[in-house]
């Protein structure tokens, strides 16, 4: 089976730099895959990506050594199994708040006897190799999201569920749950304290802590705090930010030059 290099990065004690794909385009996915990210996550929850397009995006990512992941829309066995069959090496699942929900996610992602995932790795066996079934239970990453007040209450118990490799913090939903406005790169003391609590608990139980960030500066700060899976914004945010920057330069230059638009 093709190596899941994220596990090797974590084994060295390093952090994974993850990219985020919300645009339904194989070409933009291919561009992102060539920029040096350790992994890329196809967002099927809040991104505008359907299953068929996701498959083409995964095919584009597979032209590189970048590890393909996906965030599903919900903790639904059908969604989890189908995107795993498409060849992702890990799944992120939103709104996992209880031990029972965490156990259900794990079981849907694991072949018997660890779970009840149905056999049919239609593309996974092409991407990963003919021996995919022999290694999938060990190599495919299961990453529930910790983003509700209930999840914080049940954090220690969730982290002890066998089969969970990492947890992923959705800072906007976590902020809402704690009574603050939803945003990335939070500096509200209560949210920061919750993030530190999650990292501490993850280290206690040998689980990787992951977080979505808006800027590389904040992501680096979070790595220092102990997060070992950090996402930087998304390709749509990158495109919007760079486009706005370039247009602003042109507008400012146009004013300085006293240019009069031609019609």
Image (spheres, grey):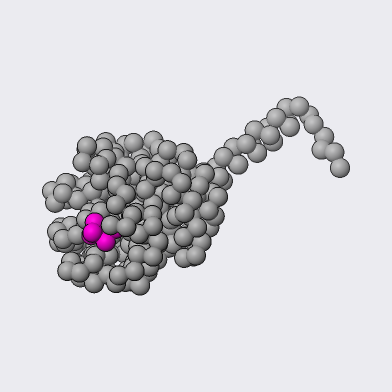
- Residue 156 visible here: yes
Is 43 on the left-hand or right-hand side of 158? Answer: right
Residue under the image location 54 percent in, 49 percent down: 28
Residue under the image location 32 percent in, 49 percent down: 2
The picture places residue 80, in percent across and down from the top left corner, at 34, 66
Question: Seen from this angle, which residue lies furthest right?
Answer: 263
In the rendered view of the protein, which quadrant contains the C terminus? top right
Q: In the image, which residues are magenta? A: 132-137
User: Which is nearer the eye, 71 or 9?
Assistant: 9
The picture places residue 4, in percent across and down from the top left corner, at 29, 48
Q: Main secondary structure of the magenta part?
A: helix
Residue 73: image quadrant is bottom left
Residue under the image location 49 percent in, 65 percent down: 52
The picture places residue 49, in percent across and down from the top left corner, at 49, 61
Whether 21 is among the magenta residues is no
The picture places residue 133, in percent across and down from the top left corner, at 26, 61
Is 154 on the left-hand or right-hand side of 250? Answer: left
Up the image or down, 220 lies above or below 190; here it is: above
- Residue 234 visible here: no
User: Which is nearer the eye, 257 or 94?
Assistant: 94
């Amino acid at each position: 089976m093709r190596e899941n290099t994220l596990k090797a990065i974590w084994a060295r004690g390093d952090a994974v730099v993850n990219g985020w794909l919300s645009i339904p385009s194989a070409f933009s996915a291919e561009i992102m895959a060539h920029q040096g990210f350790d992994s890329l996550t196809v967002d099927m929850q809040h991104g505008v990506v359907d299953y068929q397009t996701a498959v083409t995006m995964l095919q584009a990512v597979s032209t590189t050594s970048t590890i393909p992941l996906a965030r599903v829309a919900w903790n639904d066995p059908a969604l989890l199994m189908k995107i795993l069959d498409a060849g992702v090496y890990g799944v992120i699942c939103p709104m996992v708040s209880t031990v029972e929900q965490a156990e259900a996610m794990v079981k849907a992602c694991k072949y018997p006897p660890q779970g009840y995932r149905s056999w049919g790795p239609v593309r996974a066996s092409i991407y990963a190799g003919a021996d995919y079934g022999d290694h999938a239970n060990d190599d495919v990453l299961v990453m529930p999201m910790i983003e509700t007040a209930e999840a914080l209450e049940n954090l220690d118990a969730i982290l002890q569920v066998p089969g969970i490799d990492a947890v992923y913090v959705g800072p906007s939903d976590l902020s809402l749950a704690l009574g603050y406005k939803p945003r990335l790169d939070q500096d509200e003391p209560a949210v920061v304290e919750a993030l530190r609590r999650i990292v501490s608990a993850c280290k206690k139980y040998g689980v990787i802590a992951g977080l979505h960030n808006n800027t590389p500066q904040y992501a680096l700060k979070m790595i220092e705090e102990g997060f070992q899976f950090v996402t930087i914004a998304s390709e749509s945010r990158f495109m919007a930010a760079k486009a706005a920057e370039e247009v602003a330069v042109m507008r400012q230059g146009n004013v300085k030059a006293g240019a009069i638009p031609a019609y």
